[in-house]
Amino acid sequence: MELFNQENKSKEREFEKFNLKDGEVWLMSNFMPSEKAVFYYDALLSNINWRQEEIKMYGKTYPVPRKTAWYGYPDFNYKYSGIMCNPEPWTKELMDIKRVIEHFLPGENFNSVLLNLYRDGNDKVSWHSDDEPELGENPTIASVSLGAIRRFDLKHKEDPDQKLQIELSSGSLVIMKGALQHHWLHQIPVQKKIHEPRINLTFRTIKL
Ligand SMILES: O=C(O)CCC(=O)C(=O)O
């Protein structure tokens, strides 16, 4: 496997592990070399079928504050915030990235990926947990960032002293593991000063 053409440097790529109360977050800031991050950012921006979904709240309909897409093996459908996602088939770029992530996470075999396109700092994802039943008990979720640097906030659901903030740079990889989705919420907040887009890919394993 090519590991983004960095075979000889792959040993230098290690996870920084945040062992949180009731869950784990791992960060690999240099998952992709910067030229690869630019390559995949450009390819995904133009090749992905980005959709503007809508959510219903209290009887009103609102546009989701980012664009989204869902890719993966057939039949692994996923429902979040009332939006039903039927996967589009893996593209070569998504499969390349999936394989390199799995190299660093032996035993994982992701069958789908949710993509988010934050057009600028006004786009966001509000506090939530990835705790949909399709993901199983303690899901491992692998999240790749491309493009603008955005802040990733995490907070414990019951203990207000437990918080974490990470700057997600282009080419970084975050892993959420263990019981994290039971006990923690995460968000990408609005950051008005950011004018460039960011793409995020969250690789998931849907249980049928
Ligand atoms: O954009 C991110 O880094 C987070 C995305 C996210 O929380 C999600 O898709 O559930």
Image (tube, rainbow, N blue to C red):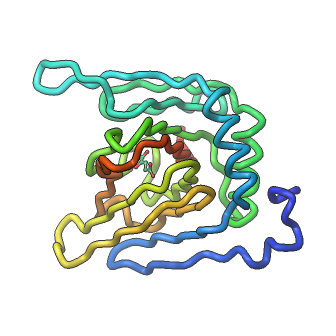
The quadrant of the image that shows the N terminus is: bottom right
Closest to the observer, 173 or 88: 173
Q: Give the residue at x 78% y 77%.
A: 11
Left or right of residue 83: residue 28: right
- The percent position of residue 67, horizontal first and vertical second, equals 44, 30
Residue 194: in sight, yes or no? yes
Q: Residue 117 at what x, y percent from top left?
A: 48, 37
Q: Is residue 125 above or below residue 27?
A: above
**Residue placed at 58% from the left, 27% from the top?**
87
Rendering coords of residue 9 (x, y %): 82, 73
Who's the residue at 73% across and 61% down the image? 33
Q: Is residue 117 above or below residue 187?
A: above
Depth order, front residue of 170/31? 170
Q: Does 110 sit left or right of 127 as displayed?
A: right
14 left or right of 160 in image: right
Q: Vertically, is 68 above or below 181?
A: above
Viewer-proximal residue among 104 and 125: 125
Q: What residue is rendered at 86% in x and 58% in y?
A: 5
Q: Quadrant of the C terminus?
A: top right
Q: Position of residue 177 (x, y in %)?
A: 48, 65
